[in-house]
Image (cartoon, grey):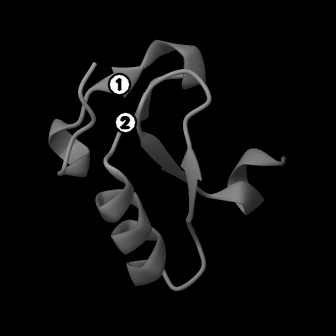
Amino acid sequence: MIAGHVYSQAPRCAECGGRALLIEEAAQALAKESLGRLVAQRCPFEDGWHVHAPSKESD
């Protein structure tokens, strides 16, 4: 699976609950633009990165 540059067009990672699989630059840019609401994290299963909101996912 090739990681995407655009969130809405990125492939989804089945191992990570369907999260978008992004290139590192796209994931880091989204995390930066979110002003701390999102974090970028390397996918442990595929060659790519995810963004997620840790405060929402810890509930």
Q: Residue at x 83, y 48 (%)?
A: 58
Report whether 59 appears left or right of 32.
right
Q: Identify the residue position indicated by label 2 in the image.
A: 21
Q: Identify the residue position indicated by label 1 in the image.
A: 12
The crowding category of the residue bearing disc 2, from other C-alpha atoms within 10 Å (few below 14, some 14 to 19, many at least 20), is many
* Residue 16, quarter of picture: top right
Q: Are marks 2 and 1 in contact (CB under 8 Å)?
A: yes
At which x and y percent is residue 17? 56, 22
Q: What residue type is labelled 1?
A: Arg
Foreground of the two, 5 or 12: 5
Say if 8 sits above or below 30 in the image. Answer: above
At which x and y percent is residue 33? 39, 81
At which x and y percent is residue 52? 57, 52
Foreground of the two, 19 or 1: 1
**Separation of disc 2 and disc 1 at Cα?**
6 Å
Q: Check the picture and name the quadrant holding the N terminus.
A: top left
Mark 2 or mark 1: whose residue is earlier in sequence: 1
Circle 2: element type: loop
Circle 1: element type: strand
Q: What residue type is labelled 2?
A: Leu
